[in-house]
Amino acid sequence: MTTRDDAQDSWRAPAGRQPHDQAYFLNLLGDSHTGLGRHEAAIEAYRQAAEEFRSSGAHCSYALCLWKVAESHLSLGEPWHALGYLEASLPLLHELGLTRHEALARDQLAQCRSELTGARLTTEGERSETVSPEIRGKGRFLLCPGPMDRRAG
């Protein structure tokens, strides 16, 4: 015998729901937090959504969530956190042909690098791995995104 609880998952959605539903919900939740100026909460929602999209192979949504995490960090005035997300999202945005987002991310990345070079946290032309030890240990770059190899998995 099937009970009502058996026919629903932990999100109270009907069993057999679309595999990306939770990730889409988290992405929309992040958008809502962003609209309300709650950037810390938005970052967490976007990070969770990105992880779900990445694990399910939703490349476009994954790339956009990485970019949204970076934007949220920039809204908080944290270019050192945004840098890695922008570097990870750029090749994906390019590969997916999302030219508008790619151009925005490229401009944001240049601005981050300029700000961090001016603050002597990175040196000219270096990537985010060169962030000073004082900042490196304080990062929230938990997702560790990078270029996805579509041949894998």
Image (tube, rainbow, N blue to C red):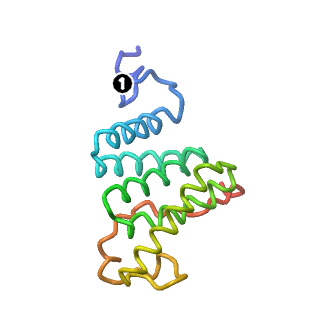
* Residue 55: percent from left, percent from top: 54, 49
* Element type where label 1 sits in the image: loop
Q: Nearer the viewer, residue 3 or 145?
A: 145
- Residue 147 placement, left or right of 8: right
* Residue 137: percent from left, percent from top: 31, 76
Instruction: Please tell me which residue is depicted at 31% across the width and 58% down the height of the picture.
Output: 76
Q: Which residue is mark 1?
A: 12
* Residue 17: percent from left, percent from top: 50, 26
Rendered image quadrant of residue 147 = bottom right
Q: Nearer the viewer, residue 47 or 42?
A: 42
Instruction: Please tell me which residue is depicted at 49% across the width and 53% down the height of the picture.
Output: 67
Residue farthest along the right direction in this orientation: 151
Q: Is residue 48 above or below residue 24?
A: below
Q: Work out which quarter of the rendered image holds the C terminus and state it.
A: bottom right
Instruction: Please tell me which residue is depicted at 56% across the width and 51% down the height of the picture.
Output: 63
Q: Work out which quarter of the rendered image holds the N terminus and state it.
A: top left
Q: Is residue 134 above or below residue 18?
A: below
Count of numbered tags: 1
Instruction: Please tell me which residue is depicted at 31% across the width and 50% down the height of the picture.
Output: 39
- Residue 76 placement, left or right of 47: left
- For disc 1, the neighbor class at 10 Å (few under 14, some 14 to 19, many from 20) is few
> Type of residue at label 1?
Arg
